Every structure is written in C-alpha cells, then in structure tokens.
Image (spheres, rainbow, N blue to C red):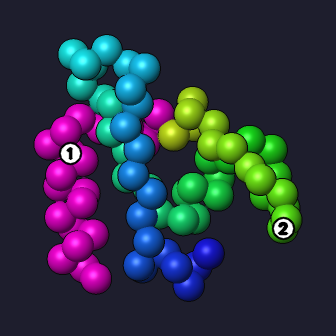
Amino acid sequence: MRLLEPYVRWLFVDLEESKDSPKRFAIIDSVIAKECVYRKVMEGKQNNFNINKIKSYATDWHGFLEKMAEFMLKV
C-alpha cells in the first residue's frame, strides 16, 4: 500500500446525504482506505468500505477540489 500511496486516490461521494449537506465528498489515499474497510483486510477476501469511517474524511465540494488539485500537482 505504501508503494501506491503517491499515485492512487480513492474518491467517494455520499449520495445518501442531502444534496444540501456540505460534507458529501472524500478523497483518501490507499493507506487510509485500508483503515476504512470493515474488519481486517485479508488476501483473497472481498472487503467493503465502512462509510462511517470514510465520513470522518469528508469535505465540501471546494475542499474536495483543493485536495484533488493538490494531489494532481504533487504527482
């Protein structure tokens, strides 16, 4: 995961939140993504993301764009 960290981002939009809710967007790296799955990540096993853990990284649209631009300019 650490090898992918500089090059990969996971993007999330919470469609269940109200469109008026400011914090609906998240962009996280692979290390954080691994921390946001249900239970323990195991090889050969499908893991689902825990949206409640991802919500702690959520931001509004402008924050999302800033993080995306920061990532793109870094790589």
Of the residues under marks 2 and 1, which one precedes in the sequence?
2
**Disc 1 marks which residue?**
63
Where is residue 15 drawn, in percent x and y?
38, 26
Label 1 Cα crowd, 10 Å radius (few <14 / some 14-19 / many 20+): some
Q: Quadrant of residue 14?
A: top left
Looking at the rendered structure, the secondary structure element under dot 2 is loop
Report the magenta residues as a range.
55-75
**Disc 2 marks which residue?**
43
Where is residue 50 drawn, in percent x and y?
63, 37
Q: Quadrant of residue 45?
A: bottom right
Report the Cα–Cα distance between label 2 and label 1.
Answer: 33 Å
Q: Amino acid at mark 2?
A: Glu
| Residue shown at 43% from the left, 20% from the top | 16
Image position of 5 with respect to 48: above or below: below
| Residue shown at 84% from the left, 67% from the top | 43
Q: Quadrant of the N terminus?
A: bottom right
Q: Nearer the viewer, mark 2 or mark 1?
A: 2
